[in-house]
Amino acid sequence: MEGSRQNFKSSGNSPETLFEEEKLEIRVLLDRLSRTLPGFVARPGQRAMIAEVARTFSRCREEGEAFREGRNLSVIQGPTGTGKTMAYLLAGIVLARSRKKTLLVSTATVSLQEQLVAKDIPLLASVLDNPPVYELAKGRGRYLCERNLFSLTDLQAGTAFWKHPPSSLEIDLLDRLRKDFPDTWDGDRDHLPVSVPDSLWSLIQNQGTSCTGKRCPLYSRCPFFLRKEAYSRADIVVANHDLVLSDLVLGGGILLPSPEKSLLVFDEAHHLPGKSLSHFRESLDLEGLAPWIERIPGLLERINAFFDVRERDKTVQAQAEALTNSLMTLGTWLEEHWEGKPAGSFSEAEQDGSNGIFRGSREQSLWRFPGGKFPDSMIEPSRIGASAARVLAERLQLERDKLAEATTGSDVRRNRERDAFFLDVGVHLEKTLDAVRLLSLYEKVDPEGEAPFARWATMWKESGTFSHRLEASPVWPATLLEEVLWKRVSACCLTSATLMSLGSFKSFSSRCGLSMLPGVSYLPLDSPFPLDRQGVLSLPVMRSDPTDFESHTREIVESLPVVLSPTGGALVLFSSRRQMEAVRKGLSPEWQNRVLVQGERSRKDILALHEQRVRAGEGSVLFGLSSFSEGLDLKGDLCTHVVIAKIPFPVPTEPVEETLSEWIRSRGGDPFREIALPEAGLRLVQAAGRLIRSETDRGIVTIFDKRLLEKNYGVHLLRSLPPFRLEHPDSGKKPNT
């Protein structure tokens, strides 16, 4: 049943003010939840968050309205137990309906998406007079393209549409899918009636470059467009950060409700800066792309023949040659300047006279351009290639549109020929656009004073031949997010249990571009739990410095059996897999049998076995890396002790991080203070946050890092941790709860 979208109006209130009717409905819904759900109590933190979300969404912009400098944006840190999910859902649905918007909720993990759709939204729906319509959004690649399925199973066409000779098993699988769709299968990959391998699904999935949209004769029953239409009718759409960012890269409103028509919530928002960088990253295989470009003139000639056009387009031939020559020039130049570099691996970067930083071996190596500055001699080939790629992309798009609109009547042969051309053009267009995006970042110098793009090349040897890839990525997503999101979205709340680092929102807001917007509101909520009575922070006296790998590892091996209970549930977190494996190997056989190591089984299986052991009264110790520092919800006896091997400082080994550090230094800044320390503080809080997950939990956090007591930055890291009772390292007492 679709919920009605009300439009509350109250004379005398400005458009940026909560209407009295909205306030009343929120209070009524809270009261219903408290009477309906066993044990539900709206804590002060949750009430404060509801109020903040409601205020933010009441300032939503309408399409065409002036940019509000962030007054329609808020950042909320809500520790575990706050009730964040129900807070933003409750306030969000009331405001979305009254302001005629869609509530778009974006998460970073599949588990939270599933929890929202299977548990949280149905709970909210149970107290609403008009239950909300809600949809789980997925990328178009999760849905079937029926036209592709028909092409591959068309007996008259033979194997013309296949990329390889099909096996009998593949043909049988597709025949089964064609039989089941749409009567018993809805075209969603997650609902497949049989297991379909990735390689086969890639041939029948919905793809933007081969989709004709409303011009497709199968449009009315297309699974992707049916779901997209459902999103437009929904009150709540649940997506993920990757899908939201993908939609923004495409222009917004392509895969999801547009930013202008949405009240957006980023849950697990601490992932947003990193996710943003990955979505704006570009790469191009120089030698691999060249054959695709060389085929474009011939492809367009065949399409002309299909339309009975006999003229040969010399412009296309010239532009294809220009782009191919550009790619080959770049590849040749890179290979020549890689000549003579030391063979074998070497730990320190080599400053080279050709203005590069090399590392790796002759079989596979990386060349990063300091400060993101590409050598001047290569800017002109990049410019020529980018210009040619733009011309070819425009022409391919025109041909694609022409094929989409072509009418062939009942001529089966011409229908198949047109569809084959359309698919072929789509693939070549996608490859050409890759060249446009990458070469556009190499043909120009970054504006003075702005954060640069990181630029680097990789070379690898395969079958005796060297290949080269150019890559580029922004190092600071702030400006990009401001342009594609903050200046467009109607209103947005960003929330997580860990957004503050070293007691401040500064690092997060700077990376996201929110610090440039004076109207953004920030709300840090206190934990609803009495953490000072529930947890102990233990800092044992350590002889070794964590930078001394061998000594530090030996000391951890000696200390773990002393601090851990042989029968309890514990989590030990490491910053490197190398140390994690070395510690496990160094333990006695008795303790090794208690250890479950991340990566040796699936996450689900490890957690199930851990719970089984703890419930049976046996000791169980989880060894994990950074991904185990968040998302694990081990309540009660499942985790009474969290051990952190050392302060989780990020190691700038990637080109993006290295270029960012260079840029900060060039401006007189300190990368350690501005990037590494805040990031370590955030990771440390996340790791410590695995301990107390409910009001009844008790436990200890132990950190094997003497820098917390000896370095001047240690006090700042300690202050940012939960207010556990500190066990003084010189007291000689074993911490206990």
Image: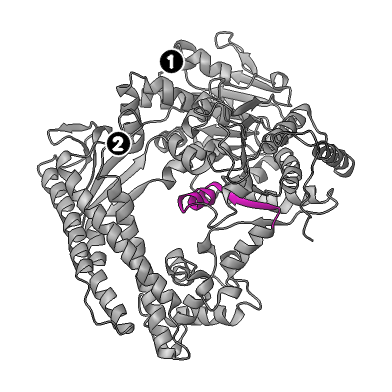
Q: Is residue 344 left or right of residue 599?
A: left
Q: Which residue: 51% across, 29% down?
A: 508
Label 2, residues with CA under 10 Å away: few <14, some 14-19, many ≥20: some
Report which quarter residue 735 is drawn in: top right
User: Which residue range is magenta in the image?
Assistant: 234-251
- The label shown at residue 677 is none
Q: How many marks?
A: 2
Q: Nearer the viewer, residue 390 or 178?
A: 390
Q: Which residue: 49% across, 15% down?
A: 714
Q: Position of residue 151 (x, y in %)?
A: 45, 81
- How far is the residue under mark 1 from the one under mark 2? 47 Å
Q: Quadrant of the N terminus?
A: bottom right
Q: Is residue 590 visible?
A: no
Give the amino acid at mark 2: Asp
Q: Is residue 412 left or right of residue 380?
A: right
- The label shown at residue 543 is 1
Report which quarter residue 399 is drawn in: bottom left
Q: Is residue 13 visible?
A: yes
Give the amino acid at mark 1: Arg
Is residue 441 magenta-colored?
no
Q: Nearer the viewer, residue 324 or 612?
A: 324
